[in-house]
Amino acid sequence: MDPAASLWWSTLDRAGTSRPALQRHLDVDVAIVGGGFSGLWTARELRRRAPDARIVVIEQAVCGFGASGRNGGWASALYPLEDAAVTDRHGADTQHHLQRVLRDAVRDLGAALDEDGIDAHFHQGGTLTFARSDLQRERLQAAARESDDHEWLDEHEARERARVSELRGALYTPHCARVHPARLVTGLADAVERLGVQIVENTKVLRILPARAGRRATVVTVGGTVHADVVVRATEGFTPGLPGERRTVAPLYSLMIATEPLSEAFWEATGFDGRETFTDGRHLLIYGQRTADDRIAFGGRGAPYHFGSTVEPRFDADDGVFDLLERTLRELFPHLEGSITHRWGGPLAMPRDLEPTVTVDHATGLAALGGYTGDGVVLTRVAATALADLLSDPGRTTDFTTLPFVHHVSRRWEPEPFRWLGINVGLGLATWSDHYERRTGRPSRATAWLERLLG
């Protein structure tokens, strides 16, 4: 995908310029493969801990080309697993610790951007999850009773914040900020360079080789090799393109649309004065925000998973999904009159057990982080901080090194065709459940099958 196709890249203050590609051999302390949020935050945190460390970031296109520059701009405390699932797997104390770190991390992200002079349109207005049917209201009210992170707003209270069609109430959490992701990732790349980190772009990585007797860990690229004490893989949705990584994560496509800047009259009728991000209680995820220039940026799941974990630029666009997103947006806001000006998409990485990972193997010199399932704007910085703590002082325990996804390795996805069948059946079950509940007003039993499918 041409990054300029997205709203975010087309509204940057200045056109991005590509950095030179790698054209020679390098010897460094740390080589980071991937110039998105994960790789850049890792470089920043390592360099701040070790100002003399020789660090290179290797990006196959331009920094932020992947999910980091294309996402919905939610800087949230969300975790891919629900709280109950985290508690079942890791215990209540670990779940509470994770929740506290993620909540603090939303605010801390804003502070880090201020420190680095990055204007990413950060505004912590929280998230509204609308109930637009009686079933959704019941589910969301139950969620509010089980969480100290969410406040239930009745219909009147919800309308004081925002107005959508068929509104029955809403959940509100303050732990989310709106950001402009391309401004964030390009600003972060500039900040990392100012710290003395080398960035090479337009450099395709062919292989990552572990250390062995007489050889350090190695990155083999089309332009040269890089030897390093540690090689960090931060490739997210593009991970399956590396040798041996085809089943590590499943690249799922999330697509987005954006409106033209909307009138003052529209926003007076619609609300969102607090710049809250928004979603609703359906099973197939949607997400949106009011941008700094008063557009609606709106996205959702629904694009199919492609056989063999294939990632190709042609999958970034799906007219059927784009049309469905526009119909959904106009259903939410029946008085929306503005046109759709941007359509774009891209892959995110979903691990088999829905948990991210931060790993370090000192024997091989290989490390990795990723697998955020679309919740990476904040999680990337948390994961990068954990990895930097592990690398800079292996014996030290911090709030970040004790998170449940540190040293966690998800089991591999099933081989094809089972992977293709399972993921696309899951997407179909979520879609069918929403249609069934809307038509009948009764809970869909298919959601139980969806939960079993995801484990």
Image: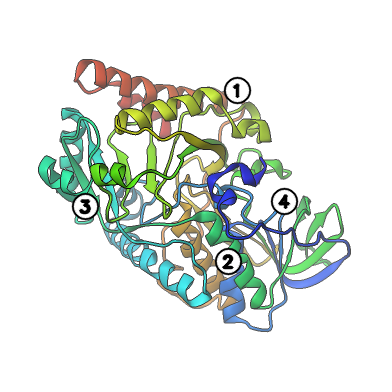
User: In this figure, which residue is indicated by the disc labeled 2?
Assistant: 188
Q: How far, Cα to Cα, is label 2 from label 4?
A: 16 Å
Q: How far, Cα to Cα, is label 1 from label 2?
A: 39 Å
Q: Earlier in the sequence, mark 3 or mark 1?
A: 3
Decide: is 455 above or below 401.
above
> Which type of secondary structure does the marked residue at label 2 adopt?
helix
Q: Earlier in the sequence, mark 2 or mark 4?
A: 4
Q: Quadrant of residue 173?
A: bottom left
Q: Quadrant of residue 224?
A: bottom right
Number of callouts in the render?
A: 4
Q: Residue at x 25, y 21 (%)?
A: 437
Q: Amino acid at mark 1?
A: Pro
Q: Earlier in the sequence, mark 1 or mark 2?
A: 2
Q: Amino acid at mark 2?
A: Leu
Residue 274: give x, y in percent of width and height. Answer: 28, 56
Query: In screen coordinates, is 364 left or right of 183?
Result: right
Residue 304 is at least partly visible in this image = yes
Q: Residue at x 35, y 29 (%)?
A: 330
Q: Earlier in the sequence, mark 3 or mark 2?
A: 3
